[in-house]
Image (tube, coloured by chain):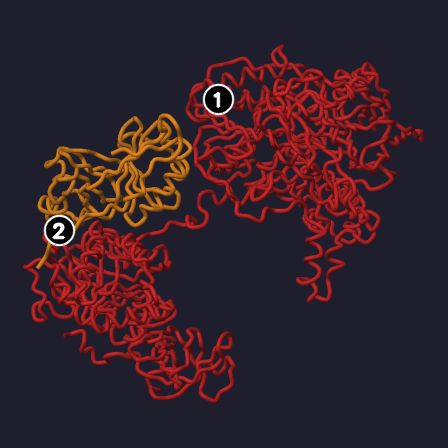
Chain colours: A red, B orange
Amino acid sequence: MNVAGRIVAREANGRSSAATLPTQPFRLAAGGLVDRSRTLAFTFDGKRYAGHPGDTLAAALLANGVRLVGRSFKYHRPRGILSAGVEEPNALAELRSGARREPNTRMTTAELYDGLQAASQNRFPSLAFDLRAVNSLLSPLLVTGFYYKTFMWPSSFWEKVYEPLIRRAAGLGRAATGADPDHYEKSTTFCDLLVIGAGPAGLAAALAAGRSGARVIVCEEDFLLGGRALADRRRVEGRPAASWVTEAEAELESLPEVRIFRRTAVFGAYDGGTYAALERVADHLPVPPAHQPRQRLWRIVAQRAVLAAGAIERPLVFGGNDRPGVMLAGAVRSYLNRFGVAPGSRAAVFSNNDDAVRTVADLAAAGVPVSAYIDPRPQIPAAVRQVAERAGARVLTGAVVQRAVGWEKLLYVRVANDTGQEFVVNCDLLAISGGWSPTVHLTSHAGGRPQWREDIAAFVPGTPPPGMTVIGAAAGDLALADGLAAGARAGAQAARDCGFSVADAPVPFADAESTVIAPLWRVRNATGKAFVDFQNDVTATDIRIAEQEGFRSVEHLKRYTTLGMATDQGKTANINGLALMAEYTARSIAETGTTRFRPPTTSVAIAAFAGQHRGREFRPTRLPPTHAWAQELGADFVETGEWLRAQQFSRPGEPDWLATVSREVNAVRNGVGFCDVSTLGKIDIQGADAAEFLDRVYANLFSTLPVGRARYGLMLREDGLVMDDGTTSRLGETHYAMTTTTANAARVLQHLALCREWLWPSLDVQIVPVTEQWAQLSIAGPKARAVLQAIVDPAFDLSNQAFPFMAAGAGTVCGGVAARLFRISFSGELAYELAVPARFGDALARRLMQVGNDFGITPYGTEALGVMRIEKGHPAGPELNGQTTAGDIGLGRLLSKKKDFIGRAMAARPGLTDPNRPTLVGLRPLDRAARLRAGAHFLPRDAAATAANDQGHMTSVAFSPTLGHWIGLGLLARGPQRLGEVVRAHDPVRDGDVLVEVTSPVFVDPQGVRLHV
Amino acid sequence: MSEAALLPRSPLAGLLRPVGGRGAAGVTVAERGSLRIAGLVARAGGAVLADIVRAAYGVDLPTSPRRTEADGLEFIWAGPAQWIVLAEPGADDLAATLRGRFGMLAAVTEQDDARVVLRIAGPRVRDALAKGVPIDLHPRAFGPGDVALTLAGHVPVHLWQVDDGPAYDIAVARSLAGSFCHWLRDSAGEYGMAVEG
């Protein structure tokens, strides 16, 4: 015994605190790829420990003799570290604290850094003393499917009682409650060859392709390249495998078109050679450096891919196989050889294959005594026996471990052999191997089904996604030499496929090995709980129960028992589980099949998918030209589609938004105001057939519009319903300027493009969006002309005769700034829309404030705009809701009978011309003090509030400062024939009932006198 | 009556700021301000327009996503039979000039204010652009004169490579300049971004 207790004094790394750190009693005196010249301090459950750069948290904990690292999900059983990689089911921790706290982090992949804070999960009150471990005694109650069986009734208990109870008792780590302070990003890159996994096979592929000049990306999930070459004492080309890796890495680094992504897991394969990968850019640092992301999501588009993702070792299923101290045999070698850590002080090895005996040799070489090598095979190859015996291990063949005994740590194992003999083997470390499962997940993402290979007792890839070649252990070729050869071949072929010429190069060679296996899916006569899925606490018995209760398909098995549904997605559990189901149902494993693997293959933070698009940057924001000016005025803003528009310009002393909006409306009705309407869609239409084109897309005529005039236009969809409206002006014989609503600008442009390109390609018409080019301000109110007079250049004649209602023209303002002027009105007042090149929009708003000061000019926002259009009965978004006809909104007269147009035929369908359709009317409350609510449904005055009595609904409401009470627009069955009638506006959700009188939708200036002054 | 002319405001005002990085900036950005920009859509297939352009400027209008330069003008492909034309600041009213030259052969629109054009360059520019521009900008795939209509983050952009520096010009809708600059600062911050001009 020369490990435990042997303390190698090391120099502190200059930090005063390091000197007082505990020693690492299980750190081997030499060896491994950790930097022993530096010591890192970290805490686990508040206790301070030391480790080295190059350690994972798991390795460092083992070096410190920490074996108990977590509690299991359901039974709260003590758990230790099972693996040394991404497949880890037990050793999960919360890392960091506060808003950076990250639950369910695998200690086996978490890279140690100075100051790392880690905490165990799922224990109460402490890891060593967990009260809920009593669950283990209650396990007869917590049987398979217990959620479904226990929490079924009464259903009202589900949300209030059962779910909170389950959530508190179960679940693993706790998510942070604060907003994630770190930055995430997404990136796209392209390559000829993507190599997934940088073990020996992947490196050989990357070298073969990279030397040809091909663009190669190598993705390695680990922070070191090398894969199993770092964990096993092997030789490649006559050198230690780790040295060969170093040389290969250096050569790859020297190739300009080869990029190596470390800490990068490829987690999804998609169509078109697209792969998704997560790069953990700064997870190994306490805090990301300034301007660096914590994680980066890569979209990698590759012409060819080589999957060299290796294989995952399977546990064996026997009693107490989850005791801390039971560890995968390959993981034991990782800790010994890569990290220089002894994961125990006295070991035994239990394996059904030739590979694991290397663990016996490596333990012995590291000075850890091995009590026994236990193999269920009656006969084992002489070479295997020799290795074990040379290491001093007692060789027990035809033998199995029936039970691992201990609680928080392993004390001994009970072994029985096929002659009925029983043994007790003392050990605090049991290395187990049930064989290796190729990491086939990515090959399934495009629908490929893994194929069972009886000879190696493993699923190998079926049909991989197009362009992907699978090599090495991932393809079921477990021998190192085979992986190297396959890598060299696949890399060269990929480069040739991409048009590169590849020089012949010798294939790297390695020492031979045997990987023979005899499957052992469970130990019969095992006593105690035998776990299949460690993280979800699924035992062999649970699988038996699922079979007995009829959940025999692997998909049912998974959902009924939760096998493979934990954060590790059953990487160590699935094959054992389905093999047991095969046994219980007397089917072959091939017949039983696997569940389908879907992306992501490993857990990916939602933040990584969001990348930069969080909060305000969730989607782009479009700002109108006057935004900065409105901001200076302290405007409130509202999102309308992508745009951010000024909603109202409140002034000090105004009690609420209603007071502000009413002031703005009154200013326009009695004086003058202005509003930025640049967000309305503007489309330039030119061509000899422009007039014809507009006649076809609008329901009303535009070919008859004189040059220099504007006209309201109504556009239908092909199905006869209203699509959009707006004013379109004729700037020249073959030149029109169309406007659309803000909301439909993009849709109308698409529609016009479809019409031009597809329906009528013979028309000479060109359609160009110009929304962004013009800042357009609406200047409205009785004093609008006077204000405008102060800024237009002298050539502009604004008189009512020269520039009447619906006139459109071009000229200059403010001493030579090009401008377009339209006398159109949404407010019902004398109004103009003035357009200038967008760069001048800000200055134009400021100039209007100056020159309009004497007239009391008032900027107004979208709220006042909305109030005034309701006062005038103009339909807008709530009325143009995609379900209304021209007739419904009172515009049936616009449907031209002189021409054909889009939507004409379908608008004549009986359902769309039914006189009983709800039609636009105005509504005012009988009690003038009552408030109206949009969304209220209309009922006959004395009718019951049933759907059968529903006669339409209130679409828009506003408080009208002009009238001094609330008004509404609504769609009421036969509305225009019911003027003067009183109906109920029924709103069961908010204020109940209001009696309303049906009126004309035009509340203010019904004759339109003000428009024409 | 009118007063002095209005002062123009760039949508990039206050938005282009250096970010991060000590030492040499990995990315540089400059506004190509006050450019004259016109939209050009060929009528009737554009064969005659191409002839006129060849006669007037000695270049072929690109029929694939490419950019060509002549006589102080840049013709940038913007879709089938569509281009944007750029002229340096101070040039005459570009749209008027083109209308005069092409008459009824093309629909010309003023676009001077519709887009902002940024020149983005530097040794790490491709890495920064990769964080939102989902196309292959490797020199084997995209070179000087190549043009793309693509995205930067969620912002639609019109992008072309200027030289082997590499330098790229990126045209962004005016209203989206703020969102674009936010994306650019986020993406280039890691490499350090300097503002020129």
Judged from the image, the secondary structure of the residue bearing numbered disc 2 is loop
Q: Residue at (40%, 30%) from the top-left corner?
A: B21
Q: Residue at (39%, 46%) from the top-left corner?
A: B154
Judge left or right: residue A668 versus residue B21. Answer: left
Q: Quadrant of residue A951?
A: bottom left
Label 2 marks a residue whose chain is: B
Q: Amino acid at mark 2?
A: Ala
Question: In the picture, which quadrant includes the N terminus of chain A?
Answer: top right
Q: Amino acid at mark 1?
A: Ala
Judged from the image, the secondary structure of the residue bearing numbered disc 1 is helix
Q: Nearer the viewer, mark 2 or mark 1?
A: 2
Label 1 marks a residue whose chain is: A
Residue A799 in view (yes/no):
yes
Residue density around tag 1, few if under 14, some if 14–19, many if 20 or more, within 10 Å: many
Indicate the position of residue A118 as horizontal and vertical percent values: 65, 37
Indicate the position of residue A586 as horizontal and vertical percent values: 79, 43
Judge left or right: residue A565 versus residue A351. Answer: left
Instruction: Name the residue carrying label 2.
Output: B5
Instruction: Name the residue carrying label 1.
Output: A209
Pointers 2 and 1 in contact (C-beta within 8 Å): no
Q: Residue at (56%, 22%) from the top-left corner?
A: A487
